[in-house]
């Protein structure tokens, strides 16, 4: 699992390093990186909005099924699944977009935790050799423990004092890259390489987990006011809406500040993206477009039907009008039937009388 996330972090590291080369600041690079990711995920946001609109439209039908099969859970689930298939809706369709930022955050975490391998893409052998050497140096090895995830961060953080020990391991250009990266984690007075958990109050890194919680719950509050249907979400959607902010707060507290900073920027860009999606793809607009597509499809189907030749139309018209022309004759034959019935009835009555008379 670690190798997969490390590979994913390496891919994201190329994007981060590309933006870092342009702006020379890791915080700004994270902002640009997040905007690009949100643009790539925008089609999934539209799909999620359509799924939410469809779920809201199905609310009335779902209540009918609950009233009809409330005591039979198995039958209710069976009919509900048929309803989802009929409407073309996936009950898990909205969860995918909600969960997508999580693996991206893990990939970014591995990019920040292993900046030498995943951002600068230095050879792993050289990185391992450098960390092993630093662990043996008196007065320096105290900052490096065996198998620690944060050893590479410590190397980047204290690179100015460790540079002389690394000249025989890395090339001159590689040392220049590490030096450039080590000075690019300062953003608005915050050191994004530090963790809020191990920093003092004056470092102001505690703002990162606080802003994570405020931006997450704040954006959800405004979206629920804009879309009342979100208050009726069930299942994983409702759980993720309240659980993800708490998870982000915890991660932003125990991980390097760059992770929490990414989560804040991701939440803000997601909020802006949702506003754009709601303005362009509101439930009313989605329903109107769906009805318009149905009407257009019906018109195309009717237009595709070939018109019958005039001779065939006249023949069908004559066949349809033929029963109406013979209807008086059928009415005229009714007295005969009535008379026959009467005669039969009379004969039947005479037979009964003879039978009764013979009986006597």
Image (cartoon, grey):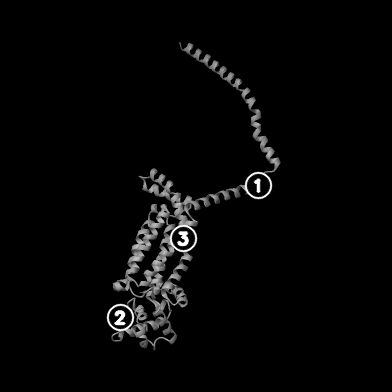
Q: Which SS class for mark 3? A: helix
Which quadrant of the view contains residue 117? bottom left
* Callout 2 secondary element: helix
- The dot on residue 45 is 3
Position of residue 177 relative to residue 304, above or below, is below
Q: Residue 191 appears at what percent x and percent y? A: 36, 75
The structure residue drawn at horizontal position 49% and vertical position 61%, both measured from the top left corner, is 43
- Mark closest to the chain's N terminus, 1 or 3: 3
Real-space Cα separation, disc 2 to disc 1, in angstroms: 83 Å
Tag 1 residue: 306
Please tell me which residue is depicted at 69% across the width and 43% down the height of the picture. Answer: 309
Numbered label attached to residue 157 = none
The residue to which callout 2 is attached is 143
Closest to the observer: 232 or 30?
30
The location of residue 341, given as percent across then percent down, is 56, 20
- Few, some or many residues within 10 Å of mark 1 (<14, 14–19, 20+): few
Q: Quadrant of residue 167?
A: bottom left
> Mark 2 or mark 1, which is nearer to you?
2
Picture quarter containing residue 25? bottom left
Residue 285 x/y as whole percent = 50, 52
Mark 1 or mark 3: which is in front? 3
Dot 3: within a 10 Å radius of its alpha carbon, few (fewer than 14), some, or many (20 or more) residues?
many
From what the image shows, is residue 285 above or below residue 123? above
């Amino acid at each position: 699992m670690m190798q997969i996330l490390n590979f994913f972090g390496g891919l994201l590291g190329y994007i981060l390093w590309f933006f870092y080369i342009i702006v020379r600041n890791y915080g700004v690079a994270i902002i640009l990186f997040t905007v690009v990711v949100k643009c790539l995920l925008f089609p999934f946001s539209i799909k999620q909005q359509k799924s939410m609109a469809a779920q809201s439209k199905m609310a009335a039908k779902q209540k009918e099924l609950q009233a009809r099969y409330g005591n039979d859970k198995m039958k209710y689930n069976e009919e509900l699944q048929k309803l989802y298939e009929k409407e073309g809706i996936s009950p898990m369709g909205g969860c995918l977009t909600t969960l997508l930022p999580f693996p991206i955050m893990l990939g970014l975490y591995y990019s920040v935790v292993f900046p030498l391998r995943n951002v600068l893409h230095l050879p792993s052998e050289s990185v391992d050799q450098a960390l092993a050497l630093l662990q043996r140096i008196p007065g320096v090895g105290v900052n490096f423990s065996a198998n620690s995830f944060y050893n590479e961060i410590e190397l980047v953080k204290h690179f100015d004092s460790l540079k002389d020990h690394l000249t025989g391991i890395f090339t001159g250009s590689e040392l220049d890259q590490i030096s450039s990266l080590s000075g690019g984690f300062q953003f608005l007075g915050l050191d994004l390489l530090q963790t809020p958990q191990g920093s003092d109050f004056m470092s102001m890194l505690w703002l990162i987990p606080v802003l994570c919680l405020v931006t997450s719950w704040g954006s959800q509050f405004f979206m629920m006011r804009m879309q009342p249907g979100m208050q009726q979400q069930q299942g994983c959607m409702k759980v993720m809406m309240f659980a993800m902010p708490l998870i982000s707060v915890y991660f932003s507290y125990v991980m390097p500040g760059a992770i929490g900073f990414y989560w804040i920027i991701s939440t803000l860009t997601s909020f802006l993206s949702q506003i754009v999606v709601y303005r362009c793809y509101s439930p009313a607009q989605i329903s109107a477009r769906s009805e318009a597509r149905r009407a257009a499809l019906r018109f195309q189907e009717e237009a595709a039907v070939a018109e019958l030749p005039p001779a065939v139309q006249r023949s069908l018209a004559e066949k349809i009008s033929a029963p109406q022309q013979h209807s008086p004759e059928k009415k005229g034959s009714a007295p005969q039937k009535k008379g026959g019935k009467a005669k039969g009835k009379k004969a039947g009555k005479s037979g009964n009388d003879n039978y009764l008379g013979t009986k006597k």
